[in-house]
């Protein structure tokens, strides 16, 4: 290594590097000394490649030698940097940075900092130190502070004073590096020292004779501080914002940098200190809008508004040689203003209306920006405004402000689409794309003006793939979101460029073009009856373009799949015009079914073809297709099996007469294996297919026996499942009905099988309650399918079971009651004398489930014949005090069923029902009050005009229970679908929801639950009330001492918190509001103190709070960042909580759930860019990573896709780096 030949030295150093990198390398004290000396010696080697290798040797060496040796090397390098020759300075600086980067242990860090820090300080502030040395020292100090700033707390003040003095250096490079250095230091400074820094910088800005370049540096310093410390800068905004705004407006005309830095600092404040910046937002908005068009050296006197094409083309020629000036830096100001405005849009959803009034027209006007990079920023800012609109409104409100601007947007964008620049056109299409996503039908009147731009983008030889893809995506979105007739005048102009790019070589362009073709097919023939538009000229060009891609084997999978889907659409839509082509085309699709990569797409394409009303002639491939599909039912791929079931169903419905019974039998054998409660969606599809097969009149006896032997046993097992519900349960009911209709199956045998499936078995014990309801529904469907005679005999048999001794077999009685209810709901049972009295007898049963089933049965029988049984129930409620709760449940069944079926009650009945229900509003039993509320709510759906005034009157009732009941009734009357009650209740909502400030906690909770339901189902009805309601809602989240009482239980005392349920409901309501009314919720004022106190509350309250925090971290990042420090303590407490030694399993499990819930929230927080401004959060993440149990849980949660909170168009703040090595 000390030889004269540089090649030898290079080889020897390279060998040493390899040795040092070996896992097993160990050095004794002598070798350590030799190694460190020789490597330091090699750093000064005249050959650059040798010294470069020596630097690389330092990285492994630091880990392989003792701490004293590393400190010694650091000191020698530092001496070389400060006192050595100029030519060795660079390499010494790189070597020092390498050592600092490799230090991992706190003890070594501390030892190095003790010796390194004073030397670096001397290098920065020492008199006579050269600029180069200062810059190198500042660079190294920046690295040191970034990595070990927390370990240097004792030196912070000394370092800070040394660095602040350099802000007034005459050398720009020194000032620039000092700004970075102070920013690195500031993230670990105490609040006092941070305040000192800010005061010093503001004082520098305020002093009269400060040079302009020093002013620029200090403004940069403010921006860098804000980016480094985030929300901690909030308290200093009142000192800094007015100064920045003042400098921005009073700077000399050519001082563009000063304005740029001021706007960049304001942008940082908006993103990182949302709570403290609130009062300045209007001022910043006006400033950003003013400088968005700041262009003092250029006057735009071109004709702006002209519809003359020739004039536009002339302008185009002019624009090629328009004004340029290399000295002109005003574009930097405009760019900074655009980014500042984007930050305002992203961080202040509540300012949306104001932004539309003031910012939207200005942004549209600035689409004409002459500097391309700035134009892109203007486009991006406008896209942020559109995204935020989509985020805030979620398609619930009519976006009138945006709708009014559409003509201006289109006009301005059209001008951009005529520009020569590709980048500009891509940006313009991005704006249009976002516009169509947020406001789907807004371009109906402007399609004609946009077509030339699309044509030019697709046909122009200079167009790039990127531009073509953007143009095609926009075309696809616009075709899909508007009525087909809008495009009919332009189909010719649109189809030829699209079809020409189907032949492009780049697969992404081709795939997107094929997707556009799919939309074009729907547009040219929206329905088969004929829309007055002649589609025939487009059939063969579309077919030929797609066919050429379909038959081409050598292409990307995405293109293959798009071609298959598109051909499926073409055949199903134009099949009657493609008679000659089908024999050539269909076999290709069948061939694609045989390929593992494309088979799923091909199966779906055949489903589309089979569902076509044109009854396409598939005779040439039908047998082959059925055989392939039957085989797919055995495959492991779930998506393929699902698609196959759907396609087979469609094919058998349309072409059953051409498929033989032998094929049916094979299908039945295959689908029987798919029926189980482990996949209910698949089960529903399999049963639907089975019903389709049985419904075919040509089904042979063999098919019926295959169903009985293969499918029926599976169905009888499935019916016992407690998971059975929804579509699968409906399909199962249809299956039993189909079995009876097929006439090859005995009704009595089926009924017996169903009833016996409810018997408890010795192995598995009793049948689940849910399963009994499923069995009862299937029995009812079976009876109705079998006809009146069988139905009557079954009802008689069930009634006989009830007449038998009620204390014996409760499962048999339970099922009999449920079956009677289900049959009675579907068929009038008044021909069976005294059936109601037989059922009401069961109210006396000692078993609770029998009583509940009897009440269910009585209500459902009344649905079958209201005029006979409703008066009976009402009479019983009046006369049978003890059975009131059960009878009210029967009444509820009647009312709920009527509200779902949109049936009407007789007026006299309504009067009696209402009187009866209002009499029970004050019942002491909560169960009775809840049933009454649900009944009132569901009647309000049927008779809103009568009910709403009656409920409103009772909001002022002196009885608290009555007030609570009417509010809960309103909750039950608000359903997701539009109802006539909506417009009637709208003016009266306040009188119900304002009970949130009632004296009684039950009433307050009822109002909170009602608000939650409104927010979830009909947010538009309450948006106007939210400014008044939200503070009252937040107040319900606080622990109220007056609601906490101590119960003396003799040997020990027990604390009861009566406000717990109310707090839980309030937080759950906020969670719902974040989804539907984000623009109304001001997150900054909610997080502290309300959410913070919830994170430290009871288990039941913490869970919704963690969910809220995850949502806020996703949707309102800046608001969460602003108070991140204060949220760490409660989260840390939760994840470190240990249950008592004698805790029961339930408590241990609850605590585990709680820890996972908190870690889920922490994972969401860790996804926020810039979170490493919070030292506390950094430490929390460090603590989690050091604890194996916590890290394992955190790791599994982080990698679990289900934890991410969806957010359309969420915006990330410019990253300051993540705090955990693996970003989420």
Image (spheres, rainbow, N blue to C red):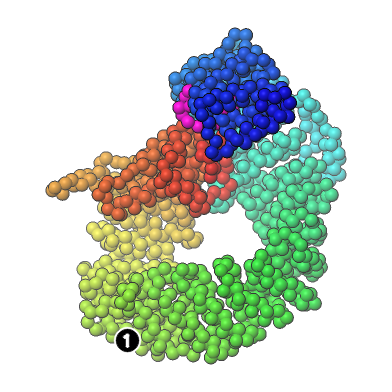
Q: Nearer the viewer, residue 1155 or 581?
A: 1155
Residue 132 at x, y percent in the picture: 66, 17
Is 262 contained in the magenta span?
no
Image vertical order of residue 366 relative to residue 684, above or below: above
Q: Nearer the viewer, residue 205 or 1202?
A: 1202
Query: What is the span of residues highlighted in magenta in the rendered image?
Result: 96-111
Is 107 contained in the magenta span?
yes
What residue lies at 42% left-to-right and 88% top-to-bottom? 747
- Furthest toward the left, the residue is 1050
Q: Main secondary structure of the magenta part?
A: helix
Q: Is residue 189 visible?
A: no
What residue lies at 73% left-to-right and 43% top-to-bottom? 412
Q: Circle 1 sits on which residue?
A: 797
Residue 664 at x, y percent in the picture: 58, 83
Kindly indicate the quadrant of the structure image that contains residue 282: top right
Q: Nearer the viewer, residue 356 or 597?
A: 597
Residue 239 at x, y percent in the picture: 51, 21
Element carrying mark 1: helix
Image vertical order of residue 771 relative to residue 1132, above or below: below
Image vertical order of residue 663 relative to residue 55, above or below: below
Q: Is residue 69 visible?
A: yes
Q: Nearer the viewer, residue 360 or 466?
A: 466
* Side of 668 where 516 appears, left or right: right
Quadrant where the image shows the N terminus: top right
């Amino acid at each position: 290594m000390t030889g004269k030949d540089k090649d030898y030295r290079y080889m020897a150093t390279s060998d040493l590097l390899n040795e040092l990198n070996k896992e097993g390398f160990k050095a004794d004290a002598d070798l350590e000394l030799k190694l460190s000396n020789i490597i330091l010696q090699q750093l000064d080697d005249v050959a650059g490649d040798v010294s470069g290798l020596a630097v690389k040797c330092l990285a492994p060496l630091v880990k392989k030698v003792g701490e004293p040796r590393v400190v010694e090397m650091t000191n020698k390098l530092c001496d070389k940097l400060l006192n050595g020759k100029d030519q060795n300075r660079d390499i010494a600086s790189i070597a020092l940075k390498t050592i600092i980067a490799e230090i991992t242990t706190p003890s070594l860090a501390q030892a190095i900092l003790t010796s390194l820090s004073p030397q670096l300080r001397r290098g920065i502030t020492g008199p006579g130190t050269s600029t180069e040395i200062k810059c190198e020292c500042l660079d190294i100090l920046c690295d040191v502070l970034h990595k070990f700033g927390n370990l240097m707390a004792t030196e912070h003040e000394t370092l800070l004073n040394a660095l602040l003095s350099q802000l007034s250096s005459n050398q720009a490079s020194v000032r620039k590096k000092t700004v970075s250095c102070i920013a690195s230091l500031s993230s670990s400074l105490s609040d006092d020292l941070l305040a000192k820094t800010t005061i010093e910088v503001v004082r520098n800005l305020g002093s009269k004779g400060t040079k302009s370049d020093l002013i620029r540096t200090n403004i940069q310093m403010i921006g860098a501080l804000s980016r480094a410390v985030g929300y901690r800068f909030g308290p200093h905004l009142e000192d800094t914002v007015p100064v920045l705004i003042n400098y921005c407006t009073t700077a000399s005309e050519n001082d563009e940098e000063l304005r740029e830095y001021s706007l960049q600092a304001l942008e940082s404040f908006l993103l990182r200190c949302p709570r403290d910046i609130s009062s300045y937002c209007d001022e910043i908005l006006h400033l950003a809008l003013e400088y968005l068009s700041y262009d003092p050296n250029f006057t735009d006197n071109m004709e702006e508004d002209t519809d003359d094409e020739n004039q536009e083309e002339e302008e185009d020629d002019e624009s090629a040689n328009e004004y340029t000036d290399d000295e002109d830096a005003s574009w930097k100001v405009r760019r900074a203003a655009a980014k500042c405005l984007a930050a305002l849009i992203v961080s202040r959803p509540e300012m949306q209306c104001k932004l539309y009034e003031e910012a939207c027209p200005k942004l549209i006007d600035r689409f004409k920006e002459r500097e391309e990079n700035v134009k892109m920023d203007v486009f991006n800012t406008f896209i942020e405004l559109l995204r935020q609109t989509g985020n805030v409104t979620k398609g619930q409100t009519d976006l009138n402000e945006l709708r009014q601007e559409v003509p201006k947007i289109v006009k301005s964008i059209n001008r951009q689409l005529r520009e020569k620049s590709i980048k500009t056109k891509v940006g313009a299409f991005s704006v249009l794309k976002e516009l169509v996503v947020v406001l789907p039908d807004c371009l109906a009147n402007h399609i004609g003006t946009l077509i030339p731009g699309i044509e030019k983008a697709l046909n122009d030889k200079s167009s790039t793939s990127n531009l073509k893809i953007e143009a095609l995506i926009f075309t696809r979105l616009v075709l899909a979101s508007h009525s087909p007739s809008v495009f009919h005048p332009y189909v010719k102009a649109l189809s030829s460029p699209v079809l020409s790019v189907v032949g492009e070589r780049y697969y992404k362009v081709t795939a997107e073009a094929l997707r556009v073709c799919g939309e074009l097919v729907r547009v040219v023939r929206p329905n088969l009856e004929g829309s007055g538009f002649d589609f025939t000229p487009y059939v063969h060009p579309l077919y030929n373009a797609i066919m050429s891609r379909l038959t081409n084997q050598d292409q990307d999978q995405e293109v293959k799949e798009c071609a298959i889907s598109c051909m499926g659409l073409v055949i199903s839509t134009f099949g009657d015009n493609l008679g000659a082509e089908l024999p050539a085309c269909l076999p290709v699709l069948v061939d694609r079914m045989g390929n593992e990569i494309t088979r799923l797409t091909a199966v779906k394409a055949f489903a589309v073809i089979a569902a076509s009303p044109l009854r396409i002639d598939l005779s040439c491939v039908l047998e082959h297709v059925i055989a392939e599909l039957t085989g797919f039912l055995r495959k492991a791929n779930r998506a393929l099996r699902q698609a196959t079931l759907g396609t087979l169903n469609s094919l058998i419905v349309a072409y059953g007469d051409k498929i033989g019974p032998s094929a049916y039998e094979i299908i039945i054998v295959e689908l029987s294996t798919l029926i189980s409660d482990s996949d209910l969606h698949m089960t529903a599809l399999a049963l639907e297919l089975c019903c389709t097969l049985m419904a075919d009149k040509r089904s042979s006896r063999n098919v019926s026996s295959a169903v009985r032997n293969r499918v029926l046993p599976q169905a009888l097992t499935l019916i016992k499942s407690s998971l059975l519900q929804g579509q699968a349960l409906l399909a199962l009911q249809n299956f039993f009905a189909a079995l009876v209709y097929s006439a090859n199956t005995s009704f009595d045998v089926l009924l017996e099988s169903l009833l016996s499936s409810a018997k408890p078995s010795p192995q598995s014990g009793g049948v689940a309650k849910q399963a009994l309801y499923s069995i009862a529904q299937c029995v009812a469907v079976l009876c109705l399918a079998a006809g009146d005679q069988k139905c009557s005999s079954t009802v008689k048999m069930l009634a006989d079971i009830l007449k038998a001794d009620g204390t014996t077999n409760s499962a048999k009685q339970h099922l009999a009651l449920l079956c009677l209810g289900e049959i009675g709901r579907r068929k009038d049972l008044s021909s069976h004398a005294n059936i109601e009295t037989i059922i009401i007898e069961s109210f006396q049963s000692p078993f609770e489930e029998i009583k509940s089933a009897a009440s269910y049965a009585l209500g459902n029988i009344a649905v079958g014949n209201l005029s006979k049984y409703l008066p009976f129930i009402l009479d019983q409620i009046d006369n049978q005090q003890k059975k009131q709760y059960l009878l009210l449940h029967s009444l509820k069944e009647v009312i709920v069923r009527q509200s779902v079926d949109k049936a009407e009650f007789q007026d006299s009945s309504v009067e009696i029902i209402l009187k009866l229900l209002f009499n029970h509003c004050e019942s002491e039993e909560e169960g009775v009050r809840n049933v009454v509320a649900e009944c009132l709510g569901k009647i309000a759906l049927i008779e809103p005009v009568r009910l709403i005034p009656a409920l409103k009157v009772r909001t002022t009732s002196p009885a608290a229970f009555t007030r609570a009941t009417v509010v809960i009734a309103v909750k039950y009357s608000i359903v997701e679908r539009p109802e006539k009650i909506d417009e009637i209740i709208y003016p009266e909502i306040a009188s119900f929801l304002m009970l949130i400030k009632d004296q009684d906690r039950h009433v307050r909770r009822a109002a909170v639950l009602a608000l939650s339901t409104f927010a979830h189902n009909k947010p538009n009805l309450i948006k106007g009330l939210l400014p008044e309601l939200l503070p009252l809602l937040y107040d319900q989240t606080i622990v109220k001492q007056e609601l906490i009482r101590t119960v003396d239980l003799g040997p020990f005392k027990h604390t009861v918190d009566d406000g717990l349920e109310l707090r839980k409901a309030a937080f759950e309501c906020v969670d719902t509001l974040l989804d539907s009314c984000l623009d109304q919720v001001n997150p900054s004022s909610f997080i502290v103190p309300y959410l913070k106190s919830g994170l430290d509350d009871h288990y039941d309250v913490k869970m919704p709070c963690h969910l809220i925090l995850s949502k806020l971290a996703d949707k309102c990042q800046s608001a969460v960042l602003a108070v991140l420090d204060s949220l760490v303590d409660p989260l840390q407490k939760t994840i470190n909580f240990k249950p008592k030694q004698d805790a029961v399993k339930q408590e241990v499990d609850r605590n585990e759930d709680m820890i996972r819930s908190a870690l889920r929230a922490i994972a969401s927080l860790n996804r926020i860019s810039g979170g490493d401004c919070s030292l506390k959060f950094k430490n929390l993440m460090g603590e989690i990573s050091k604890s194996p149990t916590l890290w394992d849980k955190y790791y599994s949660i982080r990698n679990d896709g289900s934890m991410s909170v969806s957010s359309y168009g969420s915006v990330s703040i410019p990253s300051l780096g993540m705090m955990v090595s693996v970003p989420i």
